[in-house]
Image (cartoon, rainbow, N blue to C red):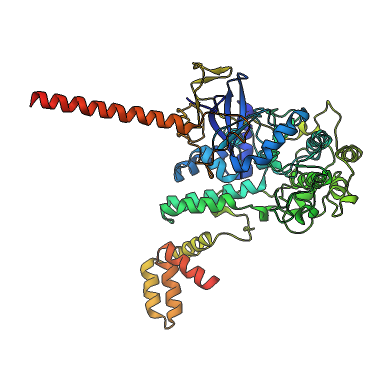
Amino acid sequence: MEAFAGRYRLIDLIGTGGMGSVWRAWDLRRSAYVAAKVLGQHDAGTLLRFVREQSLRIQHPHVVAPHGWAADDDKVVFAMDLVRGGSVATLLGDHGPLPPSYVAVLLDQLLHALSAVHAAGVVHRDLKPANLLLDATGTGRPHLRLSDFGVAGLIDEPRMTRNSTILGTPGYLAPEQLSGADPDPRQDLYAVGAVAHELLTGDRPTPSGPLPPAAGPLADFIHTCTATNPSDRPASAHEAGRLLAESGALPPADSHPWATHPDAPEVFDQLPPLPPTWTPTGPTHPTGPARPDGVGQVARPQGAGSSRPQVTQQLPAADAPVPRAAEAGRAVEAPGRRRGLVWLAVVSFVGAAGLIGSAVWILVR
Amino acid sequence: MEQTAHNLQQQVELYGEPLGEVVRRITGGLGLTQGGLAQVIGLSAPMLSQLVSAHRVKIGNPAVVSRLRAVSELTDLAVSGGIEPEHIAHELDGIRAATGAYTRPTTAQLARSAAPGQPTTGQTTDPPARFLRPTTYPGELPPSPSARSVVREIQDLFRAVASAEEIQQAAAAVDSPAIAELLLAYGTGRTADALAHYEQHHG
């Protein structure tokens, strides 16, 4: 099996998104499983910049930020902690509307994450259930981890062009984001309100029009966070956290009021079993130093008990195979050169075999 | 063991039959894996597995229930030969994309989110539902069933009252060509023809 850029051995595909794919991978340098997000070079720009400038500053129990990366000619891999419980979107699919106390715990953790992110001068700008990952905590207290900083922006930094595409997900975007406002932490708080509404009702916010009024103890919180005018929203994530605490929906730290519910929310381990050549502590046959090849075919042998399709996966071809390894800042041997050598060897071998064959034929004729 | 038996009984009360049987019927009838079905109806694979084994009783997400019902109907259709096999994948895509939001009564939704801090136990806001079998709708049909299921109902109605031969004779006897066409389309034709007729006239 080959390792991407000599460092990450991709094991199985665990998610796909609008941009790139996410793999369970083995980090040869750290000797640990990681989640590896594979992006084309031209999609990787923002995230690459984020990793280089901000990632180390946002280390927080409720944030999953890339902790390493590697690049080859046309792809970039970002390595993150492997989070096993799926996302809040998975949870919503499994359970529909969630109990208010459970929602309040999730929101509280999200606001703590946002406080850290905003303090580092970053606005996430794409908060939605699919970007809120969960540890596999079963029916216990959930543990949320904010992820996917693919369109994050820096506070107080005007965007380069006014006419660039609006990034983010309709329905969760603050109104001023739609009209091209510069990054502002209160845009993330709008999305928190929209997510809160979805967690309580099970309904995705519609891209057009305001949210229907919510009922229950979190109604005021949602109403304030999703105010059309940013100055009517809580001034900061910390302020929003205070508002949440005042709602009374947030249970004490050591209680689980939802557990008495007959259909208590449960965060399952969503990762399929490892392929046979892998154990929880790593590969069964650690190979020597991995070859610095590009991403190649990753065999997925039949794994017992896995319901996922067991096929040989191949990463999609690069959209723009322009060599930019140097720009990526980490020189990696280009896969094209190695491929050329292999072909040269094959051609030489066939040629030699042909010559020998001809000689034999001439001799025995 | 006893708990599982109790859970199975509760599933029968909620859904008309244990979810394990529903899922086996669907996966067998459509040639889907359980993981593939989970993906179509929008459940995670571990959750579907918990429901199938009756470790958990209830599907919490109403949109999932409505998608499961749609797949169940599609299975009945496929088993009875009412749909060409090559169309099944397309129908499944449609079900996967459906939000199913129309099936959720607004009042139940409010009742649930209005319980502050302490979720109601034994809440029974959901209507008694035996809807996984298409023939046992409890009076309230979903407002927008697919054209195909409407056509199937009409065909079933025709076949319940008269044989194809009788319908052909009746069609030959009526003066109006439109009525003759109607009788032939639903009473004797293939589902695809009836569907074409339905879509042409129903807009």
Answer with left or right where residue A126 lies relative to residue A120. Answer: left
Residue A194 in picture, x, y percent from top left: 78, 48
Q: Quadrant of residue A259?
A: top right
**Along the viewing direction, whichever of B43 and A238 lies nearer the viewer:** A238
Quarter of the C terminus of chain B within the rendering: bottom right
Answer with left or right where residue A209 lies relative to residue A242. Answer: left
Q: Is residue A263 visible?
A: no
The residue that appears at 75% across and 39% down in the rendered structure is: B122
Q: Quadrant of residue B172?
A: bottom left
The residue that appears at 43% across and 63% down in the rendered structure is: B192
**Along the viewing direction, whichever of A346 and B46 lies nearer the viewer:** A346
Q: Is residue B35 above or below residue B144?
A: above
Answer with left or right where residue A106 lies relative to residue A282. Answer: right
Q: Is residue A300 visible?
A: yes
Quarter of the N terminus of chain B within the rendering: top right
Residue B148 in picture, x, y percent from top left: 51, 60
